[in-house]
Image: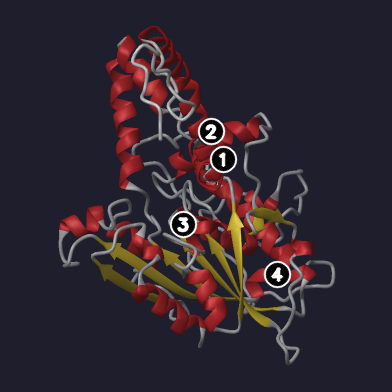
């Protein structure tokens, strides 16, 4: 039998029911949380930035990479092959021939402005495999991925690519067979620039007056040498052009980017107004990287940006023709259903006009018959979805697998 509760004994809270904090303490706690919020937010942003460093660092380099490289900033990207999110020297790639001992077809992917190698590998998740892994899984090919500083001049990156591909075929003469280059946007321009510098005769040979004969501007265009023209001598490293079979240009502004042309025109007009606010805005616009500026008219050689008229509305431009004996595949995206309109030619995939992507140099009716050029237009695809389109992949697979 239980004893009745004494109403005179106060009802203290048990351990399971702790006392509620006073209003004063609750107010102090709220103020403390509010004070810590900016620091917690900064911490979250830092963690997100670290998790997405593969994206933020290329964006930084695309915008200001030339300035980072000029002051040797550790954040400046250096052109390199990539594996597992890290740079890999050519000597550490460990390329091997096929099981039968024959050289393996090698596919090299180059991203565009502010991009990195991940765009060729995965999309929305680890199971969303893109062109590179699928080609390597379905065809007996070796896929390599490059990352580069897209804020540098296109010609600077073109020279670096030429040197890197030369090192590749020199290091693995028995493993690298036919070479296929795939470039998206700016990456395609760098491929063309590398072909230009790889094909210049006697590059680096000094003339009698001490000037570099490879860069003489007496001729409008240096004509590239290929496997069909000049054999490699014992004193020269093997040319990667002798291995080059196919070049795929996906959404490449071969005649320049209308976005950069508009930026340049805006800056020029603001500077001509010559008021302090317009000069300040023009100065900010002009801080964009050299790589972005080169996109204005697809400047592929040093002479184009070194020319005193380089900033004119219609500057001189070196003609860089396709390499003879190489198959070029021009893949053009279009936001529209129809490819027969001025809007299609100007806006194209939203970032690169279709007229520019097709390229006048690839549409010349008087081109030599040995040039092998195929142009394909994919409707209702924007600049980014060219990299994940099943139709585009199927085209690559069929041509590379031939």
Q: Earlier in the sequence, mark 3 or mark 4?
A: 4
Viewer-closest of 324 and 292: 292
3D distance between C-alphas at marks 3 and 1:
42 Å
Choose mark 2 or mark 4, whichever is in front.
2
Q: Which mark is residue 46?
A: 2
Q: Is residue 146 above or below residue 212?
A: below
Q: What SS does tag 2 mark? A: helix
3D distance between C-alphas at marks 3 and 2:
46 Å
3D distance between C-alphas at marks 1 and 4:
40 Å
Image point 51% across, 85% down: which residue?
A: 401
Question: Which residue in the structure is indicated by mark 4?
Answer: 239
Question: Which residue in the structure is indicated by mark 3?
Answer: 319
Q: Which mark is residue 50?
A: 1
Q: What SS does tag 4 mark? A: loop
Q: Are marks 2 and 4 in contact (CB under 8 Å)?
A: no
Q: Position of residue 379 (x, y in %)?
A: 24, 68
Residue farthest toward the front in the current orientation of the protein: 1
3D distance between C-alphas at marks 3 and 4:
22 Å
3D distance between C-alphas at marks 1 and 2:
6 Å
């Amino acid at each position: 039998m239980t004893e009745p509760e004494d109403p005179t004994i106060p009802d203290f809270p048990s351990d399971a029911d702790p006392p509620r904090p006073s209003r004063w303490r609750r107010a102090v706690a709220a103020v403390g949380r509010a004070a810590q919020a900016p620091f917690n937010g900064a911490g979250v942003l830092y963690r997100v930035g670290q998790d997405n460093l593969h994206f933020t660092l290329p964006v930084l380099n695309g915008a200001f990479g030339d300035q980072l490289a000029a002051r040797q900033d550790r954040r400046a990207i250096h052109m390199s092959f990539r594996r597992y999110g890290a740079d890999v020297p050519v000597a550490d790639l460990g390329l091997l021939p096929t099981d039968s001992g024959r050289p393996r077809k090698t596919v090299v992917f180059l991203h565009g402005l502010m991009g990195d190698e991940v765009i060729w590998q995965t999309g929305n998740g680890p199971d969303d495999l893109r062109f590179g892994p699928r080609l390597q899984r379905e065809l007996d090919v070796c896929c390599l991925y490059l990352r580069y500083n897209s804020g540098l001049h296109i010609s600077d990156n073109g020279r670096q690519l030429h040197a890197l591909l030369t090192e590749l075929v020199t290091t693995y003469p028995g493993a690298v067979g036919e070479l296929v280059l795939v470039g998206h946007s700016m990456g395609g321009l760098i491929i063309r620039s590398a072909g230009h510098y790889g094909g210049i005769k006697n590059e680096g040979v000094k003339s009698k007056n001490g000037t570099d004969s490879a860069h003489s501007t007496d001729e409008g265009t240096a004509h590239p040498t290929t496997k069909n023209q000049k054999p490699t001598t014992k004193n020269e490293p093997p040319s990667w052009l002798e291995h080059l079979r196919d070049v795929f240009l996906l959404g490449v502004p071969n005649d320049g980017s209308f976005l950069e042309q508009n930026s340049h025109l805006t800056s020029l007009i603001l500077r001509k107004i010559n008021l302090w606010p317009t000069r300040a805005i023009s100065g900010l616009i002009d801080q964009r990287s050299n790589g972005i500026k080169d996109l204005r008219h697809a400047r592929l050689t040093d002479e184009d940006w070194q020319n005193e008229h380089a900033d004119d509305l219609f500057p001189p431009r070196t003609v860089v023709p396709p390499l003879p004996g190489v198959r070029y595949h021009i893949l053009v995206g279009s936001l529209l259903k129809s490819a027969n309109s001025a809007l299609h030619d100007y806006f194209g995939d939203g970032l690169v006009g279709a007229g520019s992507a097709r390229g006048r140099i690839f549409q010349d009716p008087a081109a030599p018959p040995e040039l092998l050029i195929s142009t394909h237009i994919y409707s209702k695809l924007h600049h980014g979805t060219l990299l994940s389109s099943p139709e585009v992949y199927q085209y690559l697979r069929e041509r590379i697998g031939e």
